[in-house]
Amino acid sequence: MATTTGQCLCGMVRYRVTGPLGEVRYCHCRMCRRATGSAFSANAPVPVERFALLAGAESIREYEASPGAFRCFCGNCGSPVFARLARDPGHVRIRLGGLEAPDGVVVTGHVWTESKADWFTIQDDLPQHRHGFG
């Protein structure tokens, strides 16, 4: 089974994902743009039993961006690492920017495009959803 590792910018938080990543989505919502300082975030759901913090668990800080939605980041360098939703305790949503060499990444679309940055143009043929999937 494939294993992918990742870390935050300073390397204090290190983690491992065993097995495939879930469907990757590019999220253009205002909160993701603000949290990443970029046009969108790239996220993939992973079952919690396949995600392991290898180092730096004590450095993880959480911010409840909206009720039941927690953005988890390194308290030292501020790098976003993952998110968790109270309504879906069986998964974390990995921020792909911290992964070393993810295998089998399948991007399934752009979500929350109604909030897309005016200065960014989507130039691929992936499905675009004004809101989230479903």
Image (tube, helix red, strand yellow):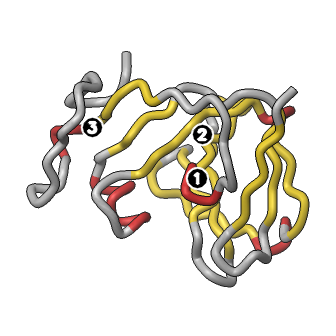
Q: Is residue 84 above or below residue 14?
A: above
Q: Is residue 125 above or below residue 72?
A: above
Which numbered disc flags the more N-terminal residue, 1 or 3?
1
Counting from the top left corner in percent of width and height, residue 34 is at: 34, 65
Indicate which disc residue 112 carries.
3
Counting from the top left corner in percent of width and height, residue 128 is at: 23, 27
Dot 3 falls on a residue whose secondary structure is: loop
Q: As shown in the figure, which amino acid type bears the numbered disc 3?
A: Trp
Question: Disc 3 versus disc 2: distance between alpha carbons?
Answer: 17 Å
* Residue toward you, 1 or 62: 1
Q: Which residue is mark 2?
A: 85
Number of other residues with Cα within 10 Å of mark 3, as a class: few under 14, some 14 to 19, many 20 or more: some
Within the image, what quadrant is residue 18 found in? top right
Indicate which disc residue 70 carries.
1
Within the image, what quadrant is residue 2 found in? top right
Q: Does the residue at mark 2 contact the one at mark 1 (Cβ under 8 Å)?
A: yes
Q: Judge from the rendering whether residue 54 lies leftward or rightward of residue 133; answer left or right.
A: right
Q: Judge from the rendering whether residue 44 lies leftward or rightward of residue 5; answer left or right.
A: left
Q: Judge from the rendering whether residue 86 lies leftward or rightward of residue 109; answer left or right.
A: right
Q: Please report the residue visible at 47 percent of the width from the left and 57 percent of the height from the top.
A: 65
Q: Please report the residue visible at 28 percent of the width from the left and 57 percent of the height from the top.
A: 39
Number of other residues with Cα within 10 Å of mark 2, as a class: few under 14, some 14 to 19, many 20 or more: some
